[in-house]
Image (tube, rainbow, N blue to C red):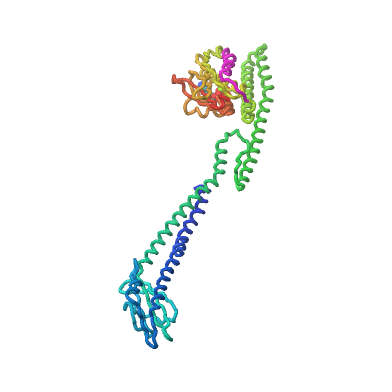
């Protein structure tokens, strides 16, 4: 599995949180509970000290003198049952509840000792208080059941769980948001790269990129600059080579045509014909390569583009192609509506010429070819439709590639025409689609331009 930065960050943040939260819960629980329990113990201490005030020492005898109302008051508690006992220095019970007369270790005068005991099967909290009785020590013991304390435990537990839950969930939420927010520049970078067309090698522009990602963007931009240089060098090499080839090839073509017209031995006639044919093929190929190189470099030179109408491009083609179509026995028809686009007319004329040339060549004699320009779904559209053999479904993607010729291709082309069409369309941010006409026979090539560009 490919590691995800987001998942990695979340694991590193959330796993420690899951460990810290229970520890924090335990700490918080005890921090809340201990002072509350001490407070309840202090209340027991206060009562014990109050009770000790009723001890009277007279010589060797000790007396405990508390009226029933005071005793009632001391025993009053809404939740717990209260017990007390008073013991003389010999450990003999003077007053109170016999159940508390339990064996306990000796206690010094003034000492307060809290202990957990059990009486009649019930857990109790008991305070043993050493009271000075002359030169000896009496004991006041006071105890209560644990209802208040258990309630306190429960309340502290609920409060702790709730606060830890709220804290944990909100921290996890904030972490999620922070990770998402932190990774957004990378997301933007990815979107920008994904949206780039192949020919767009401009440096990336990511304004709010964090400093950690900046070196990556710099490296990518340097790579793009190198790629741009390499691609331009390749294009200019192709353009230069094609351009250099064109002149000698057209000379060769003209010379071979002239040689055919001059008197020549019959035995050379077939050779001269092949020479002339190859020379014209090579000259056409050089022209096509030059067009591809120009279309390629136009991607970066869009300032050359201007507002124009597809209808005008088609009207130009009517002048240019009508005679050739007539000679080839093809009926060339036009259905033209205004369709404004932003583009370069020479390239668009080349695009349309390639489509018309294909229809004449591949649909053949007797074919009906229709050129249409119109606005469909807000987008300017250029169509060339013929009623020839069309292109088989499985070949439709391949014919757009360079140097691919269909299995039923006619003539002696190089398989570059549709690749040129695709390249020029790409330069204009237009899309080429190969379709079957409504009649069910032939080929309908549709070039759909960008709707927003059409108005520009
Ligand atoms: N109108 C059409 N009708 C039928 N098949 C077509 C048509 N247009 C193109 N094709 C098929 O698509 C293939 C590729 O076309 P493309 O224009 O790229 O090359 P080509 O016409 O063979 O050669 P070139 O255009 O270089 O002279 C052709 O070989 C042909 O098989
Ligand atoms: Mg062609």
Which quadrant of the view contains residue 317?
Answer: top right
Region rendered in magenta:
305-324
For the point 53% across and 46% down, the residue is 181
What x and y, as percent, mark residue 220?
62, 41
Q: Is residue 272 left or right of residue 18?
A: right
Quadrant of the displayed image that contains ligand 1: top right
**Magenta segment, principal secondary structure?**
helix
What x and y, as percent, mark residue 421?
57, 25
* View extreme (left): residue: 120
In depth, the one of 13 and 96 nearer the eye is 96
Instruction: Give the answer, above or below, for where 1 lies relative to 404.
Output: below
> Does the magenta portion include 319?
yes
Instruction: Give the answer, above or below, for where 427 lies relative to 267.
Output: below
* View extreme (bottom): residue: 60
What x and y, as percent, mark residue 300?
63, 31
For the point 53% across and 12% down, the residue is 329
> Does the magenta portion include 200?
no
Q: Is residue 70 left or right of residue 238?
A: left
Instruction: Give the answer, above or below, for where 59 lies relative to 220.
Output: below
Image quarter hosting the C terminus: top right
Which quadrant of the view contains residue 197?
Answer: top right
Instruction: Give the answer, above or below, for where 393 lies relative to 264.
Output: below
Q: Is residue 243 left or right of residue 176?
A: right
In depth, the one of 250 and 178 nearer the eye is 178
In depth, the one of 454 and 382 nearer the eye is 454
For the point 44% across and 78% down, the residue is 111
Q: Is residue 414 visible?
A: no
What x and y, as percent, mark residue 234?
65, 32
């Amino acid at each position: 599995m490919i590691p995800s930065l987001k998942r990695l960050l979340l694991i590193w943040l959330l796993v420690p949180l899951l460990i810290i939260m229970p520890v924090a819960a335990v700490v918080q629980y005890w921090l809340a509970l201990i002072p509350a329990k001490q407070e309840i113990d202090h209340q027991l201490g206060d009562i014990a000290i109050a009770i000790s005030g009723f001890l009277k020492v007279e010589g060797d005898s000790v007396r405990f003198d508390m009226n029933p109302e005071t005793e009632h008051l001391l025993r009053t508690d809404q939740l717990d049952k209260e017990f007390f006992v008073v013991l003389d220095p010999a450990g003999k019970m003077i007053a109170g509840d016999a159940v508390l007369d339990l064996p306990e270790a000796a206690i010094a005068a003034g000492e307060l000792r809290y202990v957990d005991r059990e009486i009649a099967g019930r857990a109790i909290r008991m305070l043993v208080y050493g009271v000075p009785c002359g030169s000896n020590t009496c004991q006041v013991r006071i105890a209560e059941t644990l209802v208040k304390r258990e309630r306190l435990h429960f309340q502290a537990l609920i409060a702790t769980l709730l606060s830890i839950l709220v804290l944990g969930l909100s921290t996890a939420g904030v972490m999620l948001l922070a990770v998402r927010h932190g990774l957004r520049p990378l997301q933007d970078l990815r979107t920008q790269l994904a949206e780039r067309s192949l020919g767009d090698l401009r440096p990336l522009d990511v304004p709010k990129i964090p400093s950690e990602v900046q070196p990556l963007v710099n490296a990518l931009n340097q790579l793009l600059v190198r790629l741009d240089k390499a691609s331009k060098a390749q294009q200019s090499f192709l353009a230069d080579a094609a351009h250099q080839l064109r002149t000698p090839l057209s000379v060769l073509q003209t010379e071979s045509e002239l040689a055919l017209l001059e008197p020549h031995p019959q035995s050379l006639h077939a050779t001269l014909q092949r020479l002339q044919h190859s020379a014209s093929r090579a000259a056409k190929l050089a022209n096509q390569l030059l067009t591809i190189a120009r279309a390629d470099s136009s991607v970066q030179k869009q300032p050359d583009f201007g507002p124009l109408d597809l209808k005008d491009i088609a009207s130009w083609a009517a002048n240019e192609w009508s005679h050739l179509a007539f000679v080839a026995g093809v009926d060339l028809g036009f259905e033209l509506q205004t369709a404004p686009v932003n583009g370069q007319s020479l390239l668009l004329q080349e695009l349309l010429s390639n489509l018309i040339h294909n229809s004449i060549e591949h649909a053949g004699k007797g074919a009906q070819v229709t050129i249409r320009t119109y606005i469909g779904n807000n987008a300017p559209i250029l169509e060339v439709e013929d009623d020839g053999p069309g292109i088989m479904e499985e070949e439709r993607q391949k014919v757009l590639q360079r140097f691919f010729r269909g299995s039923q291709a006619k003539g002696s082309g190089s398989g570059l025409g549709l690749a040129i069409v695709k390249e020029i369309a790409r330069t204009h941010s237009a899309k080429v689609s190969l379709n079957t006409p409504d009649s069910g026979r032939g080929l309908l090539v549709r070039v759909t331009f960008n709707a927003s560009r059409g108005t520009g």
